[in-house]
Image (cartoon, grey):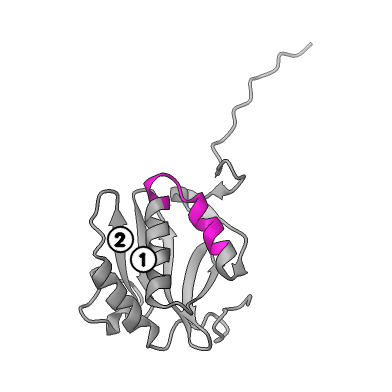
Amino acid sequence: MSERKPTTKKAGPKKTGADVVLLSGGNPQIVKGEGDAPVQAYIAAMPGWKRELGERLDALIVRTLPDVRKAVKWNSPLYGIEGQGWFLGLHVFTRYVKVAFFEGASLKPLPPGPSKDKGTRYIDIHEGDELNEAQMAEWIRQAAALPGFMGPKGNPGGANK
C-alpha cells in the first residue's frame, strides 16, 4: 500500500450566505442583468460595512434621479440614463468602495481620484469616511446630464446588452 499525501486546498473565492461568490477584494460576483434586482443582489452581497454604504449610495442615486437606469455588468453596478449610457459605477475593493464617474473630468468641483482614462474620475470611500451626500448628489446630477459610457460596442448596454 502506498501512503497518501494530505491534500491542501488553495484559497479560492469566498461564498456568502446567499451563495454569492466574492471575488478578489470582496467584490460580489453577480450575474449580469438589467434593472434594480441585480443591483440589489450585488448590494446585499457586499461584505461588512460596505453593504450599508452601497445601500446609502443606491438610495442617494435614486432620490437624485428617480428614473435612473440600473444594471450589473463587469461585476459592478452601473447607473445610467436611457439612451445616454452609464454615468456612474461602483466596485468593491478590500479596503474601500470605488465610485467611478465615467465623465468625471467634466464635473465641478472635480472628484478627487484620477484615472488612466482622462475622462474618468474616482472617489474611494473607506470605512469611517464621511459621505458628503450633498456633493455626491450634485456630481450625480451633473454626470447624468453628460453623455455616458456607451460600452465596448458603442451602445449603452455594452457588448452584452
Picture coordinates of residue 126, whole percent (x, y): 29, 53
Total marks shown come to 2
Nearer-the-camera pick, 31 or 60: 60
Picture coordinates of residue 122, whole percent (x, y): 31, 69
Q: Is residue 50 magenta?
A: yes
Q: Which residue is mark 2?
A: 124
Q: Is residue 129 left or right of residue 145?
A: left
Q: Is residue 101 left or right of residue 34?
A: left
Nearer-the-camera pick, 6 or 75: 75
**Quarter of the image containing the N terminus?**
top right
Picture coordinates of residue 91, whole percent (x, y): 43, 61
Please say whether residue 119 is visible from this viewpoint: no
Nearer-the-camera pick, 82 or 158: 82
Please say whether residue 20 is visible from this viewpoint: yes
What amino acid type is highlighted by mark number 1? Val
Residue range (magenta): 38-51
Q: As displayed, is residue 57 above or below residue 126?
A: below
Q: Residue at x 57, y 79 (%)?
A: 157
> Residue extending furthest top?
1
Dot 2 alpha-carbon crowd within 10 angstroms: few under 14, some 14 to 19, many 20 or more: some
Nearer-the-camera pick, 116 or 34: 34
Q: Residue at x 20, y 78 (%)?
A: 109
Q: Residue at x 53, y 60 (%)?
A: 40
Figure quadrant of residue 102: bottom left
C-beta proximity under 8 Å, tags 1 and 2: yes
Picture coordinates of residue 85, whole percent (x, y): 49, 83
SS at mark 2 in the image? strand
What amino acid type is highlighted by mark number 2? Asp
Q: Which residue is mark 1?
A: 99
